[in-house]
Image (cartoon, rainbow, N blue to C red):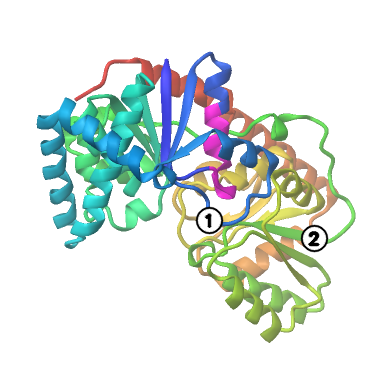
Amino acid sequence: MRIAYFTNQYPAPSHTFIRREIVALEARGHRVERYAIRPFRGALKDPEDIGEARRTRHILRTPMIRAFASVVRQALARPGPSLKALGIALRFARTSGGRYLHHLVYFWEAMILADWCRRDKIDHLHVHFGTNPATVATLAHEIGGMKFSFTVHGPEEFDRPETLGLGDKIRASSFVVAVSSYGRSQLLRWADLGDWRKIEVVHCGIDQRYLSDDVELNRSDPRLVCVARLSEQKGHLLLLQAAANLRAEGTHFELVLVGDGPLRAEIGREIERLGLGGTVVLMGMISQDDVRNEILRAKALVLPSFAEGLPVVLMESMALKRPVISTYVAGIPELVQPDNGWLVPAGDLEALTGAMRQALFASDVELFRKGEAGRRRALERHDINKSAAALEILMARPGII
């Protein structure tokens, strides 16, 4: 098959799961084009991301004369579907609270995307995230007639399904992927009963970097690591309060925060206010190899999220035999269970502090058992080759409309 992957920005440091899917589908003999609305705004650290950037076409980097030519070609070749797509864009604009200018831009982008798919002879267009990229893909599908599908991760799609027109997008698609059973349940809420059969669970996968057996138990340093975008939903500020509680008890440990995002400055100020400068390391963005090494150096990974889909870093840590501390949110309890980690109620400072204490003082035997159980569960549920095979089957079948 000739497949196109499309999303808002690609490649991006937090979107390694998209790259893994693409590479796994290519390994199965498919040709995969990379399309995105825009490139990542920051600096790419990972060599594989840098390589992917060279292979990706970005709509907003297309020279205006070429973009205009794409729009004209589609308007002349498919005037009726183009006008229908414009009407759908205006309907999306109304349900989104009157964001007409945004949706006229999405229509323009959809005309370009449809032209790319036609010129590249794309059999199937797959989109990650049910937000604006799925809007553009829905319009492009109406214009060009190609099959399309999209993966919903959450939590943003679950926070505002009506303004995103989630039900309309499901109705137009060939199928929709949820990354957890919880995610599928949320999609069922907004899909017509007749569209329920379109909604499938396909787990995000981990690749060979995390599948090798040469990982050992860390028996030395009392270190915890958190790998996540520095945003409100990840719970970093509560994590710092828990770290301060442990420090006040006299517990000596290191907490490494890997990632970047809009809360970086506030997190830095909170580290200083709580006197955690000697305990918390704010590392910023690093390469995937360095992320792996930081997980291996830790006794456990901690991710006290307030809202989620199903974080890929949890399965990565478990595959590396490092137990995880996380919250009873979204799809997380489907992966993290008592034999492979610690789950606490989201927002519960005392419970989070207690779980971190248990991880830091756990015996080597307990850490080994949890690590082995976590690896088994991660490999059983999140092998990228199995995920790619499931997507291949879904993409190859006739669209369900």
Instruction: Check whether the beta carbons of the residues at disc 1 and disc 2 lie within 8 A of each other.
Output: no
Residue 141 counted in the magenta span: no
Circle on res. 317: none
Q: Is residue 310 left or right of residue 64?
A: right
Q: Nearer the viewer, residue 356 or 198?
A: 198
- Give the residue drawn at x 55%, y 38%: 17
Q: Which residues are magenta?
A: 11-22
Circle on res. 41: 1
Q: Is residue 233 left or right of residue 288?
A: left
Q: Is residue 248 left or right of residue 205?
A: right
Q: Is residue 370 above or below residue 171?
A: below
Q: Is residue 180 visible?
A: no
Residue ranking furthest to the bottom: 273
Q: Amino acid at mark 1?
A: Arg
The image shows residue 228 at horizontal and vertical percentages of 60, 57
Decide: few, some or many residues near mark 2? Use Cα within 10 Å; few <14, some 14-19, many ≥20: many
Q: Is residue 97 above or below residue 286?
A: below
Decide: few, some or many residues near mark 1? Use Cα within 10 Å; few <14, some 14-19, many ≥20: few
Q: Which residue is mark 2?
A: 223
Q: Nearer the viewer, residue 219 or 394?
A: 394
The image shows residue 275 at horizontal and vertical percentages of 74, 84
Q: Amino acid at mark 2?
A: Arg
- Give the residue drawn at x 21%, y 43%: 167
What secondary structure predominates along the stretch shown in magenta?
A: helix
Q: Secondary structure at mark 1?
A: loop
